[in-house]
Amino acid sequence: MEATSKKSHDPVNECTNFTLLSNHLLSKLSYFLFLCSIILATFAQAFSLLQNYELIFHFLFLCFLLLSFLLTHFLSKLSPIYLVDFSCLKPPRCCRVPFSTFIENASLIESCFDSESIDYMQKVLYSSGQSEETCVPPSLLYIPPKTQNIESIKEAHMVLFPIMDDLFVKTNILPIDIDILILNCSGFCPSPSLTSIVVNKYCMRSDIKSYNVSGMGCSASVICIDLAHNLLRVHKNANVIVLSTEILSNGWYPGKERSKLHLNCSFRMGSAAILLSNKKEASKTAKYKLVRSLRTQRAFDDKAYFACRREEDSDGILGVTLNKDVVQAAGEILLSNISTLGSEILPVSEKFWYVVSMIKERFIKSEGIYVPDFKTVIQHFILPCPGRGVIRGVGKRLKLGERDMEAALMTLHRFGNQSSSSLWYELAYLEAKEKVQKGDNIWLLGIGSGFKCCSVFLKCNSPKLGESNKGPWSDCIHQYPISTFN
């Protein structure tokens, strides 16, 4: 985490700190005044009753109470937060890697992979749910792949700058209008940071607050939305850009350990830029309103903690290990997250049957806990898509149909697993199909290593037509959904 500033003594930062302090004091003061007014009014009412004063005093008492309530309400009211727009990278055709090309290139690297490793990666590819259209950065198309630091920097430029440019054009704002910059990339943490690279490229303000988030896995993007949500609660009249990507150049595993080979086959090129704002004018143009965000994690549990981690193999080669506890850890953290979220958003009927099933499970050992029907309040589901099996597993747990899982399955097929940024390609798919209507509720669900889970709840504010003609799906949306995709 880093705060970018070009001056050691910046009056703008001091002003921001003063604003945060004043907002906090104002909130406390309004609550204190409300309590004092209630106490004084109660004493005045009691005194008037004892003294047998006329009805006018009782009327004034009620007016005073109403005024105190309204004053407290308006002083403590939080500004709505909007997701104005977002942009997703459309990887260039020159980066496409068909299965045959991937397997042939890997076979030519004899010093890294043996025949068993090649066979395993081929099996993973053909069962992953990806198509032949997915892309990797140019550095991984070399034989052997180029994994030096400079290649990762080049890849960062390639995936971050185009989406920033596109977002500025879409939203009609300038780099100097950005107050907070948040960027997530799990595996690549250069110095200067990736946020500093972006700040330097666009000559952003000296008082911009920048946050570089790493090691959060596929849940990182929604975690950054949650972070932006909290920051916009204290920074008034501000714009936030969230950048989500995964740099693949330094993540290539040139070893023979099966548990680490999976990521070579599944991770693909992608990135997304999201603009959030709490400014009043954003309500007129923003696509979505940010309603709720919720984070849960199980890092305290050793099974979940060690299910997915970056470590060296027996030959000292660094890679990401996925062990047999991954599915169980993901299921447990998902259950924890949806239980909390469901208690807040579900209708009374669904909560009732859930409580009844818990009582039956505890005392008479029934068939299991009732899974609430989230489709009663949510119209669209944006699911994590590390693989086809995971998508269907999450969908089964949430009692979702093929239509509800369509965006995730089609995104995996066309673009592969793009880590945290995949969620925004799913939302872009729904927009391109013009499925999102005004007032619709959308649930973004991210699950990542640790294990951790984060949910973001959006409400469509102002749908925009014609999204199928632009964005990452512009040249292929007419081909989807694939009816034989199974």
Image: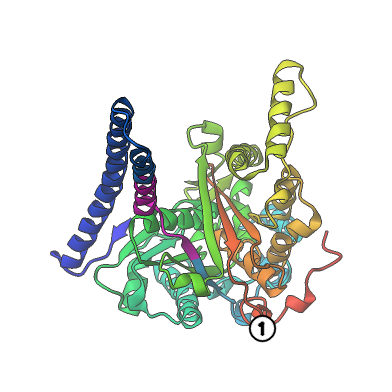
Q: Position of residue 317 (x, y in %)?
A: 49, 51
Which residues, given as a range, are shown in magenta? 66-82
Res 37 visible: yes
Of residues 98 and 272, which is closer to you in this image?
Answer: 272
Height in image: 166 above or below 299?
below
Res 201 visible: no
Q: Position of residue 252 (x, y in %)?
A: 53, 60
Q: Looking at the image, which residue is at 59% across and 37% down? A: 336
- Give the quarter of the image for residue 405: bottom right
- Give the quarter of the image for residue 407: bottom right
Q: Amino acid at mark 1?
A: Asn
How many numbered discs? Answer: 1
Read off the residue under disc 1: 469
Of residues 334 and 248, which is closer to you in this image?
Answer: 334
Q: Is residue 60 magenta?
A: no
Left or right of 152, for residue 338: right
